Image (cartoon, rainbow, N blue to C red):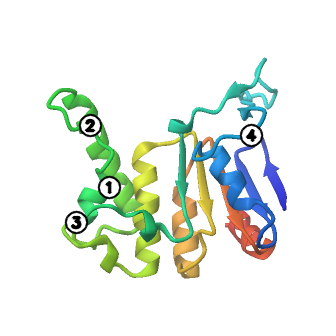
Amino acid sequence: MCACFTGCCSFGLIFGRSGSGKTTLLQLLAGLNKPTSGSIYIQRYGNDGKPNPSPEILPPERVGIVFQFPERYFLADSVLEEVTFGWPRQRGDLQLKEQLTIRLQTAINWVGLNGVSLDKDPHSLSGGYKRRLALAIQLVQTPDLLILDEPLAGLGMEMHFMLFKSISFSTLIVVSPILLHCVRFYMV
């Protein structure tokens, strides 16, 4: 397995053969598994490219992950319910719900789901649209670190360009078993 990062760790490529530990690394970064020893820290950089004084622990709630087969993790019966699954359910905090609604509309447009009915069953979407939906769910949350596990699977080249021209994050990590896919992503 190899990890390559560009600039101030704003874009990372992780590639390697099957069984090399890519998924384990993702699960550790996302907080889905705990390391058997040690801790995971992130090093932030200033606008001048110099590292901030000390690394910080990476809080799992600030990490978004889109898995290779996102439909395995869909829980709701409609696209809207799926995207809003983790939203606050209590009556208060109207301002937060308004912000989430604006981010939802932006995310839906970014990933090209604006033509899909929000009442549609997410399991009935094509593979490419399932990946778009999974990405929209993460974009609404605006994570500090967005991890895309084999994001090219099921998406055409037009979607590759459209998707990654519109996404801006402090850190984006792309995972693929094939270096060429990672390089193609980076070149977008």
Measure the alpha-carbon separation of dots 3 and 1. Answer: 9 Å
- Secondary element at image label 2: loop
**Which labelled disc corresponds to residue 83?**
1
Instruction: Indicate whether 166 appears above or below 179.
Output: above
Asked if labels 3 and 2 touch by Cβ distance under 8 angstroms, the answer is: no
Q: Earlier in the sequence, mark 1 or mark 4?
A: 4
Measure the alpha-carbon separation of dots 4 and 2.
33 Å
For label 1, the crowd category at 10 Å Cα-Cα, with few meaning under 14, some 14 to 19 and many 20 or more, is many
The quadrant in which the N terminus is found is bottom right
Q: Nearer the viewer, residue 121 or 52?
A: 121
Q: Which residue is mark 4?
A: 36
Q: Which residue is mark 3?
A: 118
- Residue at the spot of label 2: 88
Label 4 vs 2, first from the N-terminus: 4
Q: Are marks 3 and 1 in contact (CB under 8 Å)?
A: no
The C terminus, quarter of image: bottom right
Determine contact: label 1, label 4, CB under 8 Å: no
**Secondary structure category for the residue under label 4:** loop
Amino acid, disc 3: Leu
- Residue 115 image-quadrant placement: bottom left
Tell me the CA gap for discs 1 and 2: 12 Å
Upstream in the sequence, badge 1 or badge 2?
1
Nearer to us: label 2 or label 3: 2
User: Badges 3 and 4: C-beta atoms under 8 Å apart?
Assistant: no
Q: Amino acid at mark 4?
A: Thr
- Amino acid type at mark 2: Pro
Residue located at (77% from left, 40% from top): 8
- Is disc 1 placed on a helix, strand or loop? helix
